[in-house]
Amino acid sequence: MAKSSTKDDFTLTDNSTGKSYTLPALTGSMGNRLVDISKLYPQTGILTYDPGFSSTAACKSDITYIDGNKGVLMHRGYPIDQLAKHSDYIEVCYLLLYGQLPTPEQKEQFDTDIKHHTLLHEQLIRFYSGFMRSAHPMAVMVGVVGALSAFYHDKMDITDPNEQRVAAHRIIAKMPTIGAYAYKYSLGMPFPMPRNKYTYAENLLHLMFSNPAEDYDINPVLAKAINLLLILHADHEQNASTSTVRLAGSSGANPYACVASGIASLWGPAHGGANEAVLKMLGQIGTSRNIPKFIKKAQDPDDSFRLMGFGHRVYKSYDPRATVLRESCHEVLNVLGINDPQLELAMELEQIALKDAYFIEKKLYPNVDFYSGIIMSALGFPTSMFTVMFAIGRSVGWISHWKEMLMDDHHRIGRPRQLYLGETERKFNPMDKRGHTEKKTSWSWLWGGGR
């Protein structure tokens, strides 16, 4: 937990008044020092300005630790490579939710609890028919997960630990069913029932690809790859979607509505849509002989082209998740024996990126989105389902942060401030006295912000 360290306190001097203010320093169990500015505005009337919150810690958390400079990702103190090698997704879910790895008995009970919540209410299933068949699966996910709040709301007391636990289990259990049904609905195919005999990853494959007219055999290599994808996407600290869930939850909102808000945030191409963008980029490159041309485009600061799936906002060295997923990616491609020009192009681009001086200098290593997109494409997932898979894996992270926030005695409703740049006070003119001296109000001016 964060500790105060008075010997390392910070002093802020207001040059306009000459006044100085002492700000407490905080140190966590790992990571950067922080300045506690929670009392800055009440005591001084001064606000801070931090677009994108890149230098602001908005909460305390025990769940996930990232060191972007060293390429470190840990859940509850366990490095991601150890969890990926030795755990399955359900065990990681238990760890994120409850803070410890489960005993065999706890793991068995947790697994049973999750399996008993996989079915959807029949009336919720009929909700799908209200969507266009062409609707993006993420749009369907936002709607259906949000609709869960209509089925589990009246008896929901978010201050009750048992109710928190049940809500968390429902979210984890139902997300694969909800996501797979969005895909099946787009194809006009019947909805398969979840099967308790399968593991979480196996059940996801069954829900996605089984056909009621014939038997579906689970390929263990593919199930292993799905399990790995889910683990690597389970949580990633205070990213945009997790922060969205926390912000929505800070008002006391229903947990299913909070998770729906996280799905909406994840849908953005700068967040969960990045792996989908990788495949679109490969399609744009076309063939391997075009790679040098597109690398030059990426190096040109005046060119809008960007190499998707390379580099990361947080990691300034190799993405630790990509290190794990790279091996699985090659294993899946070898087992399936796929002869796909786009996937071959991706592998060639990977080799160039790992050796090219420009990529090495800029630390533009392949990230988790690069490999996850390739794996899901090889497994037969359409690109529209890539972000859905991300959402399924991330659901445990969202609900763990929601639960942690509610347990924090100091949590408050989120209320960021702003740097106001609008008009100063103006006198209101009645309609009949407004002339052409008023600012122009064309639509382009209005939507452009007037500047």
Image (cartoon, rainbow, N blue to C red):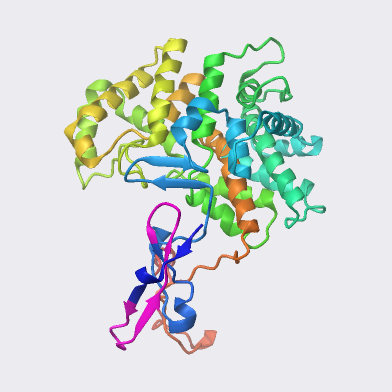
Name the image quarter holding residue 342: top left
**Numbered range of the magenta stretch:** 12-33
Instruction: Between residue 46 and residue 65, name the one nearer to us.
Output: 65
Q: Is residue 447 above or below residue 47?
A: above
Q: Nearer the viewer, residue 92 or 428?
A: 92
Tell me how many marks there are.
Answer: 0
- The picture places residue 270, in percent across and down from the top left corner, at 42, 45
The reply to whether residue 143 is visible in this rendering is yes
Is 287 above or below relative to 410?
A: above
Instruction: Tell me which residue sits at (39%, 16%) in the image.
Output: 340
Q: Is residue 136 visible?
A: no
Q: Foreground residue, 415 or 294?
A: 415
- In magenta segment, residue 13: yes
In the image, what residue occupies the spot 43% across and 10% down?
337
Which of the image's four quarters has the C terminus?
bottom left
Q: Residue at x 76, y 49 (%)?
A: 163
